[in-house]
Amino acid sequence: MKSKLQIYDIVLISLLTSFLFVQEQLLTFIPNVQLTIFIIVLYSKKLGLIKTSLIVTIHVLLDSFYTSSFGIIYTPYIFIGLMMIPLTLTTIFKKINNHILLGLLGIVYSIIYSWLFLIPFVFVLKVNPYLYIVSDIPFQILLASSSFLSILVLYQPTSNLFDQILNKY
């Protein structure tokens, strides 16, 4: 029985990672509009820390290699920015299940994710921090808005569907 559960977990993690990766690539033509934060919030709430961490790790590696951005400037900050979602949602925000509160957390995650890139841009690439912050504001607003709206609109129905599918297997 244990090996079937392990195979099930590998298949589930593979499928959900693929879904996360593909949706992000399909939406790359719209800067900072994506479903990534919503999906990681959903996975964190439904699958827990370990499985979601594996999904995030595989996703970040795939994305970094696919976009040729693997390196010290992007990869660690993408990983940290996305990993804070399952880490906080399975610990300090574990009891939050309301889609409005999760949407507000989506805004916070988006802002923190965006601000993490200030570190390599300022210290490695020597970009003026003021110019970086000012020029990034529209992109932060887009990311925060898309994260909030996708969680607000899609979390509850997708969560119910996710429960039905997971309970079936």
Image (tube, helix red, strand yellow):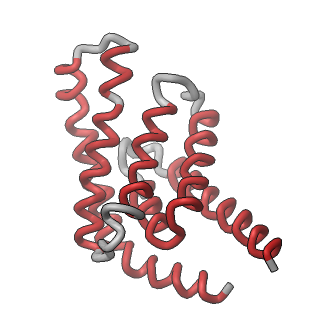
Q: Residue at x 54, y 54 (%)?
A: 53
- Name, please, the residue furthest toward the top: 126
The answer to whether residue 157 is above or below residue 141 is below
The spot of residue 153 in percent (x, y) is: 32, 73
Number of numbered discs overlaid on the protein picture: 0
Kindly indicate the quadrant of the structure image that contains residue 11: bottom right
The spot of residue 166 in percent (x, y) is: 60, 81
Q: Nearer the viewer, residue 25 or 123?
A: 123
Q: Nearer the viewer, residue 2 or 108?
A: 2
Q: Residue at x 76, y 68 (%)?
A: 6
The spot of residue 89 in percent (x, y) is: 38, 62
The answer to whether residue 164 is above or below residue 72 is below
* Quadrant in which the N terminus appears: bottom right
* Quadrant in which the C terminus appears: bottom right
Kindly indicate the quadrant of the structure image that contains residue 98: bottom left
Left or right of 142 on screen, residue 168: right
Q: Nearer the viewer, residue 40 or 144?
A: 40
The spot of residue 126 in percent (x, y) is: 32, 10
Q: Residue at x 34, y 42 (%)?
A: 113
Q: Nearer the viewer, residue 128 or 84?
A: 84
The answer to whether residue 148 is above or below residue 128 is below
Kindly indicate the quadrant of the structure image that contains residue 85: bottom left
